[in-house]
Amino acid sequence: MTSITTTGRAGRPQRRSAWRRRDAATGYAFVAPAVIGAIAFVIVPLGAVIWYSLHEWNVLANTFTFVGPQNYQDMLSDGALHDSLIASLWFSLGVVVLNITLSLFLAVLLNQHLPGTTLFRVLFFTPVVVSLVAWTIVWGFLLQADNGINGFLAEFGITGPNWLRNNVTAMISVIVVQVFKNVGLNMVLFLSALQSVPEEIQEAARLDGAGAWRRFFSITLPMISPTMLLVAILTVVGSLETFALIDVLTDGGPGTSTTVLVFYLYRQAFEFNQFGYASAISVLLFVIVLALTLLQWQTRKRWVFHES
Amino acid sequence: MSPDQLTPERPTAERTSAASVAGAHGSSPARRTRRAFGSQQLGRAALVFLMIVVAVPFVFPIWWMVTSSMKTTSEILSLPPSLWPESPSIESYRQVFELQPFAQQYVNSLYIAVLVTVGTMAVAAFAGYAFARIRFPGSNALFVLVLVGLLVPSEVTIVPLFRMVNSAGLIDTHWPLIVIPILGAPSVLATFIMRQFFVTLPGELEEAGRMDGLSRFGIFARIALPLSRSALAAVAIFTFLKSWNLYLEPLVYLSTKSNFTLPQALTQYVDAYGGPIWNVQLAATTLTVIPVLIVFIAAQRQFIEGLANSGLKG
């Protein structure tokens, strides 16, 4: 093998370098669609949204005037924006904590070699393949004031709250609906991480007298921490991008209690036609996503354990 | 320590080890083992019961969706709620097609998702392969440029993209729902997964192909691509689901009902006061969910494991 290559290189240098040149050309051709797409549909729009954010731009009135950082100053005194930031914070916090706890719990449960594990894995994963709007509509049906869940509760003499018309329960509802929808995906990621934890280490700890809890926190958790990082990033970013769930289930209400940031951005742009201000909110969203992703990435050394 | 005591806690292995320990060590350890064995069985039964309870919120909504879609308007709001329709009827399924061009909307969603899936697979396979296997000047810089898409949620760029689509005269067409996902930020994750896969291919295979006189395209098409089926399948699955679920973009770009996609169409079954016509809405929802569920259940193993092992593990 090696000798053939050497002869080839010594014998036909031109052919070799011609192959190289043609190879590089092929490389550019292969990446061209992805690179052109990234420039046209990511980089340029990102630059554009920053540029728009410095303008007063009302589509209906057809005005487009440069105002500098005015939109960002307006943000500081926009009470509705503050409400939506707080709603986003609660929503993301609730989704991340619940999702990671529940998905890890389900993965550990499925990893016990119990009978019926395959069936339950499918059941827990099912909502992931159901379209989000379909899932949300069904939950909307379940969360009505006097039917659905409350109808069943009434059988036991319990009067359930009007889930979607109360500030606190509306937020809890959207969090729960979102978590049950997506928890299966994280569960599967955790499950495959759990299955790659070597049995010998667990055994060694067991022989040293470590109980199940101790083994879980001192061995399993550190060993699946790279997956924890990935799952945390995916879940945080996913929760910040939530739109369909809110639009279908609560329309941002009651009041502004479930108006998360993307929903507010959509309203400003496509209902109030304030494209300049909406662009400034887009930039804010981008900065938040970027900051959280980088923060999680930066702190990974502290809490992510690598075997090597 | 006997090897039996080292056996992991699997049900069958446990039974053998309990028996052999009891045989080997006389009465007192045997009693202890037997009691532990009993409580362990109990514990396992409790865990199975726990799984059944936890499964309820995952399964019940789908059960209720299907059964309620066959109820009459009065039964759907009756108290107490019924778990099974008194006289199952498909009347609401007829209305699904009468109130909206639902068949057309179904076709819209389906063909858009298929085109996006095929297009994304092609773009991601070519780019992922080149970034992993071909050395050309600037390849790292271009890869970083593409990866920026991972950090930019599509909601961030919806305003400029809307403006681009508008000035290209493509509002209320399906073009933006097809072209932007294939070339833009949504396909970046696919490119990344394909690259991660191709990096792990052994170099000898390609070297052999080159010796046989294959061009680079030949090496890609005849050697690398056939080996990447599992990664491509994972890309196909999540791209299809993402396109099938798209909601914000159709809402922004489309305005005619016959152009709508399914997620958008589902929200349109409302009465004159904007209240949902529940049984018709749930019938339409059932029609969008059931085919996907059938495909999923038929291929669930490849599906779940494909997504778990697509390099997403990190």
Image (cartoon, coloured by chain):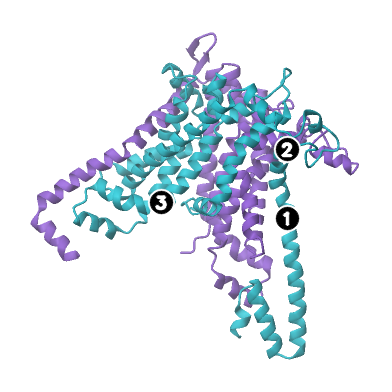
Chain colours: A purple, B cyan
Splitting the image into 4 quarters, where does residue B73 fall?
Answer: top right
Front one among A57 and B83: B83
Front one among A249 and A77: A249
Q: Have a look at marks 2 and 3 and say if they share a chain.
A: no
- Which residue is under mark 1? B52
Q: Quadrant of the N terminus of chain B?
A: bottom right
Q: Chain of mark 3?
A: B
Q: Which is in the foreground here, disc 2 or disc 3?
A: 3
Q: For the point 41% across and 31% down, which residue is it?
A: A43
Residue type at the position of mark 1: Ile
Front one among A194 and B178: B178
Q: Is residue B189 left or right of residue B21?
A: left
Q: For the point 87% across and 39% down, which residue is it?
A: A154
Residue A140 in the image: x percent, y percent?
72, 33
Q: For the point 57% across and 42% down, which residue is it?
A: B292
Residue A279 in the image: x percent, y percent?
52, 23
Q: Secondary structure at mark 3?
A: helix
Asked whether residue A71 is in view, the answer is: no
- Which residue is under mark 3? B229
Asked whether residue B280 is in view, the answer is: yes
Q: Have a look at marks 2 and 1 and say if they share a chain.
A: no
Front one among B80 and B116: B80
Contact? badges 2 and 1 (CB < 8 Å): no
Residue type at the position of mark 2: Ser
Query: CA–CA distance between discs 3 and 1?
Result: 35 Å
Q: Chain of mark 2?
A: A
Q: Residues within 10 Å of mark 2 (few under 14, many from 20)?
A: some
Query: Label for residue A173?
Result: 2
Residue B278 in the image: x percent, y percent?
73, 29
Q: For the point 30% across and 40% down, which residue is it?
A: A30
